[in-house]
Amino acid sequence: MNDTMLYDTMLYDATTDDIARVLAGQPAYRVKQVWQALYEQLRAPGDITNLPVAARNDLATALPESLLWKTESTDATGDTVKFLWNLREGGHPIETVLMLYPDRATVCVSTQAGCAMACGFCATGQAGFNRHLTSGEIVEQVVKAARRAREIGRRVSNIVFMGMGEPLANEAATRSAVERIHDDIGISARHLTVSTVGIIPGIRQLAEWPLPVNLAVSLHAARDELRNELVPINKRYPLNDLVAACNDYLIERRRRVSFEWALIDRVNDTQRDANELARLCKRLRPNAHVNLIPLNPTPGWPTRGSSPQRVREFADTLTGLGVNATVRRNRGTDIDAACGQLAAGQTITPVRFGRADD
Ligand code: SAH
C-alpha cells in the first residue's frame, strides 16, 4: 500500500493466508483460533495463551503491531480518553479518542497521519499531511480502544471516522477497515459513520461499498463564497454538486446523512447562515440532520467559537425553519481531544490563517 513500507505486513493488515504462512507446521485450526483471538476476543498477540509460545513468538516477529503507545489522557469528566500513538512505520504521531456515553461507547479513529485538506480552523489541517494509514492501522485503533473500554467494563458499540485525516482521500483503506470492523469485530453498519470534508468522487464510491454506513459531511457553510474560505476543497467540489451527491447517497443507501457545522462567532452563526443551511437541508429527502458544535479553539485560528447563547439561538432558528438540529456537547476540550483539535502534539504555527472581518 505504501511504497516505503519496511515490514511486509502489519498484524491487523494480515489476511488469514498471511497468518497461515506464519503458522506453517501448526494444525490448521490455529489460524481461526488466532483470528478469533485478535478480533472477537480483542487479545494482544502475547495474550493468545491457548497458542504455543513458539507460535506466539513467530506471530509477533513476522506480523508486528503498528501502533506504538505514547500517552493516554482522560478528560476531567473521565468519559473521554485520548490515545496518542506513533506509527511503527515512519514514526508519525496519530490520535484516537474513546468516548463513553451512558448508553454507548464510541471510538473516533484517524484515517491519515495528518490531513491535506487545509481547513484553517482544524488543528489537523493546520499541521499538514504525513501519510495515509493502512486499513490495519485504522482497525488497530479500534481494537486497542476497545480493549481499554473492556478494562472498565464497557463494550465499544459505535465507530466514527472523524479523527485525523480525510477518510475519503484514503478510500480503499477506509473501506477495508470498515469491512473488518463489521465482519470480524462485529459492529453493525448502522453504528459506523464516515465523515468527509465533501470529496464528491469519494461519496460516489461510498455508495458502492458493500456496507451501508452513515455519512457525515463537514459543511460549516451553505454558500460557496464562505465555504471556499473555510473548507478550501469546496473550490473543487462546490455545494450544489455536493448536495446532489449526498442526496443520491441517501436515496441509494437509506442511511442517515448528517451535516457537521462548527459554529464560528459571527462568521457562520448568523440568521443568513441559518436560512441558507435550512434551504440546503430541504433539498435532501428526508432532511439531513444537522450537528452543531461550537468551534473548539486551535492554535492556528484566531476566531472564537460562538457563545452558548448564539449556539442556542442558531439551533432554535433552524428548528423554527423545520430543520432537525442537535447541539453536540463538547467533549475532551481540556485534553485537546475534541473535534478539530487532534494534532498529535505536532507544532502548529499560531495564527497562520485568519479572516479579514475578525
Ligand atoms: N476530514 C473529515 C473527518 C474529520 S471529522 C471531515 O472533515 O469530515 C472532524 C470534524 O471536526 C469535522 O467535521 C471538522 O470540520 C470538525 N472540526 C475541525 N476543526 C474544528 C474545530 N476547531 N472545532 C470544531 N469542529 C472542528
Image (spheres, grey):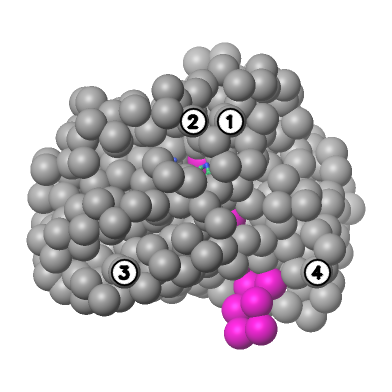
Q: Which residues are magenta?
A: 100-112
N-terminal-most mark, 2 or 1: 1
- Report the amino acid beneath label 3: Thr
**What residue sits 21% from the left and 72% below the top?**
321
Residue 128 visible:
no
Residue that label 4 marks: 77
Instruction: Evaluate if marks 1 and 4 touch, with contact meaning CB atoms under 8 Å apart.
Output: no
Question: Taking 253 as reference, is 121 above or below it?
Answer: above
Residue 357 rendering spot, x and y as whole percentages: 42, 28
Residue 108 forms part of the magenta stretch: yes
Residue that label 3 marks: 317
Residue 220 rendering spot, x and y as whole percentages: 36, 46
N-terminal-most mark, 2 or 3: 3
Q: Which residue ends up furthest to the top in the rendered image?
A: 4
| Label 3: which secondary element | helix
Residue 310 rendering spot, x and y as whole percentages: 47, 60
Question: Taking 355 as reference, is 194 above or below it?
Answer: below
- Report the amino acid beneath label 1: Pro
Disc 4: CA contacts within 10 A as few (<14), some (14-19) or many (>=20) = few
Residue that label 1 marks: 302
| Label 4: which secondary element | loop
Distance from the alpha carbon under mark 2 to that under mark 3: 24 Å
Q: Nearer the viewer, mark 4 or mark 2?
A: 2
Disc 1: CA contacts within 10 A as few (<14), some (14-19) or many (>=20) = some
N-terminal-most mark, 1 or 3: 1
Distance from the alpha carbon under mark 3 to that under mark 4: 31 Å
- Report the amino acid beneath label 2: Asp
N-terminal-most mark, 1 or 4: 4
Residue 255 left/right relative to 313: left
